[in-house]
Image: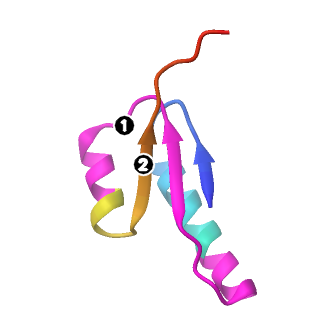
Amino acid sequence: MIDVECELNYMAIGQVIVYRKIFSEVRKVRPKALIVCRRAPSKLKEICEIDPGIEVAVTPKFKA
């Protein structure tokens, strides 16, 4: 499960939790969860790591 946002937020965390739950019920496999973002407030990143086991990848801004 991958979600991409400019900044880590509660909605992104909720989406990957819900999508992972639905996927688990349908496929009987719990997928890994990843949120890719440019910025990640430390408290939200901590929440992802401690409770729901969501990996957060912070990437630099790409120049086109």
Image point 60% across, 49% down: which residue? 3
Which of these two is toward me, 19 or 34?
A: 34
Which of these two is toward me, 41 or 64?
A: 64
Q: How is the image coloured?
A: rainbow
**Where is residue 16 drawn, in percent x and y?**
56, 61
Which of these two is toward me, 6 or 14?
A: 6
Residue linked to disc 2: 56
Query: Comparing marks 1 and 2, which lies closer to the viewer?
Result: 2
Amino acid type at image mark 2: Val
Residue linked to disc 1: 40
Amino acid type at image mark 1: Ala
Which of these two is toward me, 32 or 6?
A: 32
Q: Quadrant of the N terminus?
A: bottom right
Residue 8 visible, this orientation: no
Span of residues in magenta: 21-47
Q: Residue furthest top?
A: 64
Do labels 1 and 2 touch, CB within 8 Å? yes
**Where is residue 6 drawn, in percent x and y?**
53, 30
Which of the 4 image quarters holds residue 4?
A: top right
Mark 1 packing: few (<14 Cα in 10 Å), some, or many (20+)?
many
**Where is residue 22 drawn, in percent x and y?**
67, 77
**Where is residue 63 drawn, in percent x and y?**
60, 10
| Mark closer to the chain start, 1 or 2 | 1
- Residue 23 belongs to magenta span: yes
Image point 24% across, 46% down: which residue? 43
Residue 2 visible, this orientation: yes
Above or below, comparing residue 33 to residue 26 in the picture: above
59 displayed left or right of 42: right
